[in-house]
Image (cartoon, rainbow, N blue to C red):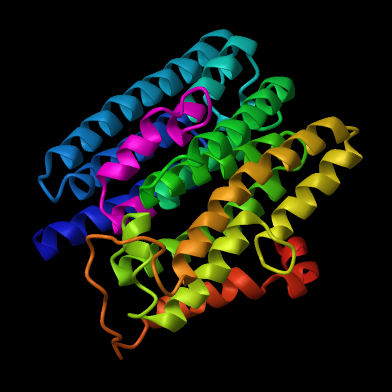
Amino acid sequence: MNPQAKLIFTISLLLGTAITTSSNHWIMAWAGLEINTLAILPLISKSHHPRAIEAATKYFLVQATASTLLLFSSMTNAWYTGQWDITQLTHPISCLILTSAIAMKLGLVPFHFWFPEVLQGAPLTTGLLLATVMKFPPITLFFLTSHSLNPTLLTCMAILSAALGGWMGLNQTQIRKILAFSSIAHLGWMTIIISFDPKLTLLNFYIYSLMTAATFLALNSIKALKLTTLMTTWTKTPSLNAMLFLTLLSLAGLPPLTGFLPKWLIIQELTKQSMAPAATVISLLSLLGLFFYLRLAYCTTITLPPHTTNHMKQWHTNKPTHITIAILTTLSTMLLPISLLIYPLS
């Protein structure tokens, strides 16, 4: 892709995100989401592969439908209450339609079908944008309207997302699909707490974005797209693979690592809100995700493949690891000890 075109699309992405996150009016928020959608489409389809074109088409159709629902929700609310302010969403029908629209934008169950397919068709760097940056504007709208949304509906969607994200990821061999289902499961954790402590949702999103960025960039550096390829990469970059192993365990939410922090705080808050059964169910469902993270981690650090593969062994290279990956992997594994400082800042 032409560097000037890539620069324009990247600036448009930042502009769309900034417009949506800083707006008070529904029309401005909608315009920002539309700019975001149009800017990411060329980045998804830049390889001109049929799968990439299919992914871009699916993404466009789903996002256009979600934007239409969002606009319809805000217009219905304005019709009944005369308010276009995002925080003044009070009409129950509007709240229900908005929940559906944002769930569709994020890829929450039952509107999750498009996300694994789109992530599978996109390059790893674009996949990173889809899993992190593109989710920030809808999460912001969730944050601003959290007081108006139905907590029971959000809890049901969250538990279903955690269940389906863990369950569907078990049988996958494509790394991008595994990370897509991982994203759906993490969105379940963010959604379950948003009615009770919206700041905790944002903290969870920031930490999830940090860990996902480290994972995607490390995978992009070692050029691994399938589990079979991942098995042969230890000889190429052992130190990077070791850090990727820890980052994957952090994504799974194992206690000594950064990923445990949001889960710990969310379980604590749910218990305070007398929702111990929901906390128990979502904690047990995270064990499904733990299984496929452990499988990924095992494939990352294995030194010899357990069976003959068609891939050539990689030579060990002395190419230095990018400083960004080094910083992100360090933060993804070592933030838990300073958690008492992080949470008040969120």
In the image, residue 70 above or below residue 283: above
Tell me the quarter of the image containing the N terminus. Answer: bottom left
Give, as a single range, the part of the protein colored magenta. 103-129
Q: Position of residue 325 (x, y in %)?
A: 43, 75
The residue depicted at 45 percent of the width and 74 percent of the height is 241
Left or right of 308, for residue 28: right
Secondary structure mostly seen in the magenta stretch:
helix
Residue 210 makes an appearance in the image: no
**Which residue does the image show at 37% across and 20% down from the upper left?**
68
Res. 250 image quadrant = bottom right
Quadrant for residue 70, please give it. Answer: top left
Q: Is 128 colored magenta in this rendering?
A: yes
* Residue nearest the observer in this picture, 267 or 167: 167
Percent across and percent down for residue 287 are: 67, 45
**Left or right for 16, reference 140:** left
Q: Report whether 135 appears left or right of 159.
A: left
Report the number of numbered marks: 0
- Up-down relation of residue 257 to residue 104 (above or below): below
